[in-house]
Image: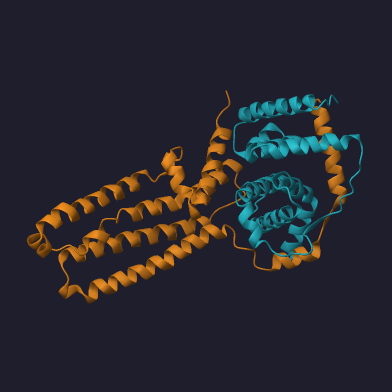
């Protein structure tokens, strides 16, 4: 079948469609007057949940830190301070994402729009990466000079290696939980779980788009 | 209100685009209605910013294709939250005519449905006889890329028709 025949076949179908379609103006009027469904609802929900939980967590940490200030150790204060600071950064990132989602424009060309959409979908990864940095503070807040002096074996032999391992793991995840690793097996396993299935699908589209936008040889 | 009437007139003149794009990206009529509704909502949302820089058809194609590509990704989860409309925004009175071309058309539609999202967008625009420059503008790729990709897809389609014994 030649090109012109294929196009003429499509045109015949078009004529049929044009004849068969009727715009339901009454229903359309009603729909347009209603508040349109919020676009990118899923992406917004995750961010709003993160912002609300993050602010709640920060308020809790700040309250605990300030109310116990005179009686707590420096290590405790630093641990909670880092936790507060990192959570606040994550909240800030989520707010930034919401601004980007709000400004997303579907009338851009397909490659640009889909690229931005995929970036928005995987932007949660960056926030997650930042949150991993604070991993060791969950094991440092109860450390004390007394513990080090009274039980050096458990302190240096168990606690410090745990904190070091958590630090290394946190830094590694911060650096590697990145879209550039989307081809790696561990990354795909990591993002295929639960809510992150959305990211995996965005990555599939990114891959397809990169292939599509590549100048053909 | 005047704006709404103008929007509905534009929509009425281009309603077939919505139907054809939605039809290429989803298989069931329920999903198609849901997708058309989302496209219309996005068009309406974008209508106040429409500045006439592009033709209405280009603007509609961009939004319809972008929404459809994203929609395809979340098709399963959307089934749960779709609006329970008993009527549809665009009604299709399927006056199917059983002629010898029906089979060819089904083959063509089946071929399109099997393409990846971006190639699907490309072939839809090609079948609508858009120029290479307009296709490049809608898709955001170079004209050279458009020409090469179209040629590959057409070859694959030709092969499919040959395999099925449709010579034309």
Q: Is residue B117 above or below residue A6?
A: below
- A88 vs B68, left or right, is left
Counting from the top left corner in percent of width and height, residue B88 is at 78, 60
Counting from the top left corner in percent of width and height, residue A207 is at 53, 38
Q: Residue at x 87, y 45 (%)?
A: A16
Counting from the top left corner in percent of width and height, residue B60 is at 70, 48
Colour used to depict chain B in the structure image:
cyan
Counting from the top left corner in percent of width and height, residue A163 is at 22, 54
Decide which of B105, A15 is in the foreground and name it. Answer: B105
Q: Which chain is orange?
A: A
Can residue B101 be seen here? The reply is yes
Q: Is residue B110 above or below residue A165?
A: above
**Residue A54: quadrant of the picture:** bottom left
Residue reaching furthest to the bottom: A67
Q: Residue at x 28, y 74 (%)?
A: A63
Picture mark count = 0
Can residue B130 be seen here? The reply is no
**Residue A28: quadrant of the picture:** bottom right
Q: Is residue A164 above or below residue A32?
A: above
Decide which of A155, A179 is in the foreground and name it. Answer: A155
User: Quadrant where the C terminus of chain A lies?
Assistant: top right
Name the colour scheme: by chain
User: Quadrant where the N terminus of chain A lies?
Assistant: top right
Q: Is residue B19 above or below residue B146?
A: below
Residue reaching furthest to the left: A149
Q: Residue at x 54, y 49 (%)?
A: A117
């Amino acid at each position: 079948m030649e090109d012109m025949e294929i196009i003429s076949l499509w045109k015949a179908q078009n004529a049929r469609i044009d004849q068969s379609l009727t715009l339901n103006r009454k229903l359309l009027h009603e729909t347009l007057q209603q508040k349109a469904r919020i676009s990118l609802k899923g992406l917004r929900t995750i961010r709003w949940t993160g912002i609300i939980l993050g602010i709640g967590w920060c308020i809790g940490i700040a309250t605990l830190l300030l109310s116990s200030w005179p009686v707590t150790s420096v290590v405790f204060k630093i641990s909670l301070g880092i936790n507060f600071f990192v959570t606040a950064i994550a909240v800030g990132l989520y707010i930034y994402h919401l601004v980007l989602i709000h400004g997303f424009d579907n009338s851009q060309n397909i490659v640009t729009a889909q690229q931005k959409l995929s970036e928005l979908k995987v932007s949660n990864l960056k926030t997650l990466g930042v949150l991993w940095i604070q991993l060791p503070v969950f094991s440092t807040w109860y450390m004390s000079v007394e513990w080090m002096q009274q039980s050096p074996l458990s302190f240096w032999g168990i606690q410090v290696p745990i904190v070091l391992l958590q630090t290394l793991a946190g830094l590694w995840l911060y650096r590697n939980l990145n879209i550039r690793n989307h081809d790696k097996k561990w990354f795909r396993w990591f993002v295929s779980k639960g809510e992150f299935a959305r990211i995996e699908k965005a990555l599939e589209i990114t891959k397809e788009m990169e292939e599509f936008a590549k100048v053909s040889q | 209100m005047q704006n709404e009437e103008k929007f509905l007139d534009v929509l009425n003149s281009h309603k077939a685009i919505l139907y054809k794009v939605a039809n290429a990206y989803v298989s069931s009529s329920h999903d198609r209605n849901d997708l058309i509704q989302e496209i219309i909502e996005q068009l309406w949302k974008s209508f106040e910013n429409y500045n006439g820089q592009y033709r209405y058809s280009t603007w509609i194609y961009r939004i319809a294709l972008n929404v459809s590509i994203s929609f395809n990704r979340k098709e399963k989860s959307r089934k749960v939250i779709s609006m329970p409309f008993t009527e549809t925004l665009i009604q299709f009175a399927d006056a199917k005519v059983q002629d010898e071309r029906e089979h060819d058309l089904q083959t063509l539609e089946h071929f399109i449905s099997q393409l990846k999202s971006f190639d699907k967008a490309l072939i839809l625009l090609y079948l609508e006889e858009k120029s290479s420059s307009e296709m490049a503008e809608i898709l955001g790729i170079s004209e050279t890329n458009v020409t090469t990709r179209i040629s590959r897809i057409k070859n694959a389609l030709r092969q499919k028709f040959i395999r099925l014994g449709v010579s034309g």
